Image (cartoon, rainbow, N blue to C red):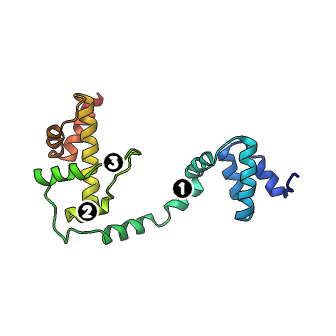
């Protein structure tokens, strides 16, 4: 038995691709449950996947703006909540950098195993300080890999003891 669709639902089913589907979905006033039902039919009909819809949704201007609402406030709260520095500046000496290298690992999907706030707590610093070191670490790994290929602990330590601007300049020279 074929389901009965309203005119709005039929319009939604006429979408040619996920991007078009997101546009039409925003313009139609269909209840969330019914929209899920229509979406399932549209996916079966077009052979697109939920991942295709998620991809289109994440790039749609409306949803991008929605996601960004309040980010500045959330980041300010997060930074304040996870400031373990007690007003002191952290000095990244060789011992601390070595410990950072040991703790800054990623899983198979490329996500950090230890969250930045957890490292900030462990190193008694701020989240921006950890993010700074992670940027330096990633730049150093790319630079070493592009020049010699093998990333040794000694070479990594040497690069991490340099300033971020120095590493950026080295990257620019490599690109030329």
Residue depicted at x 80% and y 57%: 8
Q: Dot 1: what SS?
A: helix
The reply, left or right, for residue 137 in relation to residue 21 is left
**Residue 71's quadrant in the figure?**
bottom left
How far from the left and from the top, in percent, is residue 133? 24, 51
Mark 2 vs 1: CB contact within 8 A: no
Q: Dot 3: what SS?
A: loop
Mark toward the viewer: 1 or 3:
3
Residue depicted at x 19% and y 72%: 86
Q: Mark 2 points at which residue?
A: 120
The reply, left or right, for residue 55 in relation to residue 171 is right
Camera sees residue 95: yes
Q: Distance between the residues labelled 1 and 3?
A: 27 Å
Structural crowding at the residue carrying mark 1, measured as other residues with C-alpha within 10 Å and reported as few (<14), some (14–19) or many (≥20)? few
Residue depicted at x 37% and y 71%: 77
Mark toward the viewer: 2 or 1:
2
Residue depicted at x 28% and y 36%: 142
87 lies above or below 138? below
How far from the left and from the top, in percent, is residue 3? 85, 55
Q: Which of marks 2 and 1 is nearer the N terminus?
A: 1
Q: Name the residue under label 3.
A: 106
Q: Dot 2: what SS?
A: helix
What numbered label is drawn on residue 64?
1
Camera sees residue 93: no
Mark toward the viewer: 3 or 2:
3
**Residue 160's quadrant in the figure?**
top left
How far from the left and from the top, in percent, is residue 54? 59, 50
Q: Which of marks 1 and 3 is nearer the N terminus?
A: 1
How far from the left and from the top, in percent, is residue 33? 72, 63
> 121 and 20: which one is in front?
121
Mark 3 vs 2: CB contact within 8 A: no
């Amino acid at each position: 038995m074929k389901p009965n669709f309203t005119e709005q639902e039929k319009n939604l089913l006429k979408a040619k691709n996920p991007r078009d589907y997101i546009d039409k979905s925003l313009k139609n006033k269909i209840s969330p449950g019914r929209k899920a039902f229509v979406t399932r039919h549209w996916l079966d009909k077009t052979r697109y996947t939920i991942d295709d819809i998620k991809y289109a949704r994440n790039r749609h201007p409306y949803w991008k703006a929605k996601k960004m609402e309040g980010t500045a406030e959330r980041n300010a709260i997060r930074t304040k909540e996870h400031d373990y520095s007690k007003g002191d500046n952290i000095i990244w000496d060789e011992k601390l950098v070595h410990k950072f290298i040991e703790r800054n690992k990623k899983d198979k999907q490329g996500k950090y195993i230890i969250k930045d706030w957890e490292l900030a707590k462990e190193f008694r610093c701020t989240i921006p300080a950890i993010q700074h070191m992670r940027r330096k670490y990633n730049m150093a790994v790319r630079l070493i890999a592009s020049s010699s290929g093998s990333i040794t602990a000694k070479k990594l330590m040497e690069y991490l003891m340099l300033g971020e601007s120095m590493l950026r300049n080295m990257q620019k020279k490599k690109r030329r």
